[in-house]
Structure formats: C-alpha cells, structure tokens
Amino acid sequence: MQVHTTPLPGLLVIEPRVFADARGFFLETFHADKFAEHGLPGTWLQDNLSRSSRGTLRGLHYQRQHPQGKLVYVTRGAVWDVAVDLRRQSPTFGQWFGTELNAENHRQMYVPVGFAHGFCVLSESADFAYKCTDLYRPTDERTLLWNDPELGIAWPDVEPRILSSKDQQGLPLARADVFEELTVTH
C-alpha cells in the first residue's frame, strides 16, 4: 500500500497493492494495522455503497456536529472525486483537491473530518463505496454549493449534469457552517 499526501493537510490518496493474474485480481481495501502505520482511522462505524449514472454529481456533503472521516473508492466505473477543506484554522481553508477514482486504478481517498466531499460520475454508471468514522445523521448534514465561484472547482464537463434538489441548493463557502475549532493533522 502506498499513501500519497495531497496539497491539503490530512487528505490522502491511497494506492493499495493489487495482485493480478489470469483469474482476475485481489486487493485489500482496508487493513487496520497498515492504516494505523499512516495515522489513519482503524474504527469505522458505517459502510455505504451508491450506484449513480453518468453525469450525476453528489455533494459537496459534510456533517457539522457529528463529522465523518471517509475512506472512498470506486468498485465499478469512474468518478471525479473532490474534497474541500472547511477547517477555518487550516492554511488551505477553502481549497479543493480532485482526482479520478476508478475500478482500474483502484485508488482510494481518505477524506478527514473537516472536509466537504463530493463526486461526479464519468462512466456510464459507477458504484462508489465509502467507509465512515461516524454514522450518517440526516439532520446534521450540510451541503456546500458544488459550483461556488469562490471555490472554483474544475468539475469535468459531463452531460447531462444530474443533481438532487438538496445539492442544487447548497450554500456558498461564505455562508457555510465551517469547522472553527478543528486541529489540522498530517
């Protein structure tokens, strides 16, 4: 397993070791000891799997009172995955990082507490898996506006663009309920 830092402290891209042969492939999507060596969580409270069609954009989501760290990856298809630093004390507050996650590169992204997260489906459909360090609480969920000009996220030009009404009505960074007290790690 290789763990790569990003320009945003704490946000990591993980490349698991893939064992491939004529039968197919095998990889570990999580290994507590190996993750602990890199300071990553070893306890996860919820696993999720979503299937979305081409052009679907989900996000940018986060929970304020019960924040979630997330380990995300794609099991089928491809997505453009994005995280935005919402930790007011961070030197990269309001900055974003994006990377392609797909079923061929097997990359994962660790999105720490204090980030908003979202993705856009690049393939005809995609199965997107994620582990969370806290439970989903609908009343605590917040949505950051995916196309806020202040963020300037370079979303791929994929049509049709499909968003939920909740995601269409996200708040811009200037009005978002951000994390004032979080300590920046990594």
Image (cartoon, helix red, strand yellow):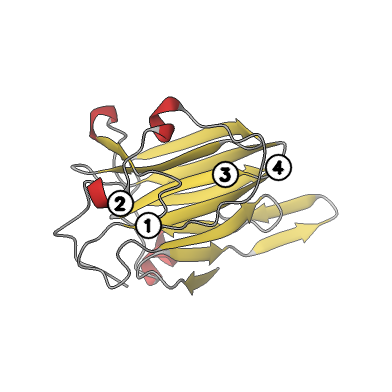
Q: Which residue is mark 4?
A: 123
Task: Find numbered disc 2 in the image and state the secondary structure of the residue it sits on.
Answer: helix
Q: Earlier in the sequence, mark 2 or mark 4?
A: 4
Number of residues whose C-alpha sits closer than 10 Å to that of mark 2, classed few (under 14), some (14–19) or many (20 or more): some
Instruction: Report the residue marked by disc 1.
Output: 150
Residue 67 versus residue 3: which sits nearer the camera? 67
> Disc 4 on helix, strand or loop?
loop
Question: Which residue is the extreme one toward the front?
Answer: 149
Q: Nearer the viewer, mark 2 or mark 3?
A: 2
Secondary structure at badge 1 equals loop
Residue sticking out furthest to the right:
22
- Image coordinates of residue 181 in percent, x first then y, are 14, 59
Circles 3 and 1: CB atoms closer than 8 Å: no
- Mark 3 against mark 1, which lies toward the viewer? 1
Q: Position of residue 30 (x, y in %)?
A: 49, 54
Residue drawn at point x = 40 percent, y = 57 percent: 151
Disc number for residue 120: 3
Which residue in the rendered view is the most extreme toward the left?
Answer: 181
Asked whether residue 31 appears in the rendered view, the answer is no
Instruction: Give the amino acid at mark 1.
Output: Glu
Judge from the rendering whether residue 129 lies leftward or rightward of residue 39; answer left or right: right
Q: From the viewer's perspective, is residue 66 above or below residue 35? A: above
* Residue bearing the label numbered 2: 173
Residue sitting nearer the eye, 126 or 83? 83
The residues tagged by marks 1 and 4 sit, at their Cα atoms, a distance apart of 28 Å
Q: Are marks 1 and 2 in contact (CB under 8 Å)?
A: yes
Identity of the amino acid at label 3?
Cys
Q: Quadrant of residue 123?
A: top right
**Quarter placement of the C terminus:** bottom left
Camera-near label (1 vs 4) is 1
